[in-house]
Image (spheres, grey):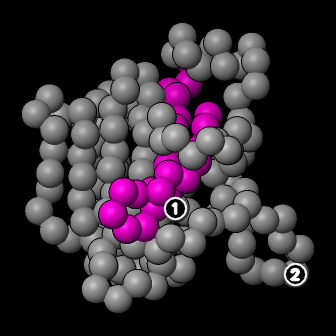
Amino acid sequence: MKPELTGPDGRVVVRRWTRHPRCVALARADLRKALAGWGLVAVEEVALLVLSELITNAVRHARVPGHEIETRYLYQGDKVQIEVHDASDERPELRNPSCEVAHGRGLVLVEALADRWGVTPCPVVGKSVWAVLTAPGSDADQAMKGGMRHGKADAEMDGT
């Protein structure tokens, strides 16, 4: 893990990780700490699962030598945006694997759990895969329940 970069108001936490499976647990602990500091423990369980899926995908599939994985957690009131940046330009695909396959369900889970998610190309190299989660019971959560909440991959790839 590299040094932490945090925005001046504490609303953004950025970390860089070596592309190693142990970084998944470290990143989860880091996100748990950020969520507690922001008072978003109600979304912790879902946020940790979403982060685990996104960062595991980066560890397994973004095999660009000499590049690290970067996580960003952005506090947005009653929401958190979780971003995982990697150096691969390959866009992840939402798949529907058969029951016999032991992998390939990560983005299916993200799709089901996140309010929105998407992929944004990075200006220099790679991409950012991100997901937005709203704390249960918040005004935004109640409004989303009135409409469509889950299953919204961002086709525009705008990262907002």
Quarter of the image where one finds residue 91:
bottom right
Picture coordinates of residue 72 (x, y %)? 33, 50
**Camera-side residue: 107 or 91?**
91
> What label sits on residue 30 in the rendered view?
none
Q: Is residue 54 above or below residue 88?
A: above
Residue 136 left/right relative to 111: left
Picture coordinates of residue 137 (x, y %)? 56, 17
Residue ID for mark 1: 54
Q: Is residue 7 above or below residue 122?
A: above
The answer to whether mark 1 and mark 2 are in CB contact below 8 A is no
Q: Residue at x 36, y 57 (%)?
A: 123
- Which residues make up the magenta segment? 114-137
Badge 1, how many Cα within 10 Å: few under 14, some, many 20+? many
Q: Residue at x 11, y 62 (%)?
A: 3
**Camera-side residue: 158 or 63?**
158
Instruction: Identify the amino acid type marked 2.
Output: Glu
Report how far apart the C-alphas of labels 1 and 2 lie in the structure. Answer: 22 Å
Q: Is residue 121 above or below residue 17?
A: above
Q: Residue at x 52, y 61 (%)?
A: 54
Using the rendered image of the protein, determine whether residue 42 is visible from the camera's viewpoint: no
Q: Earlier in the sequence, mark 1 or mark 2?
A: 1
Residue 151 left/right relative to 36: right
Using the rendered image of the protein, determine whether residue 93 is visible from the camera's viewpoint: yes
Does the magenta portion include 40?
no
Numbered disc 1: secondary structure: helix
Does the magenta portion include 130?
yes
Quarter of the image where one finds residue 139:
top right
Residue ID for mark 2: 100
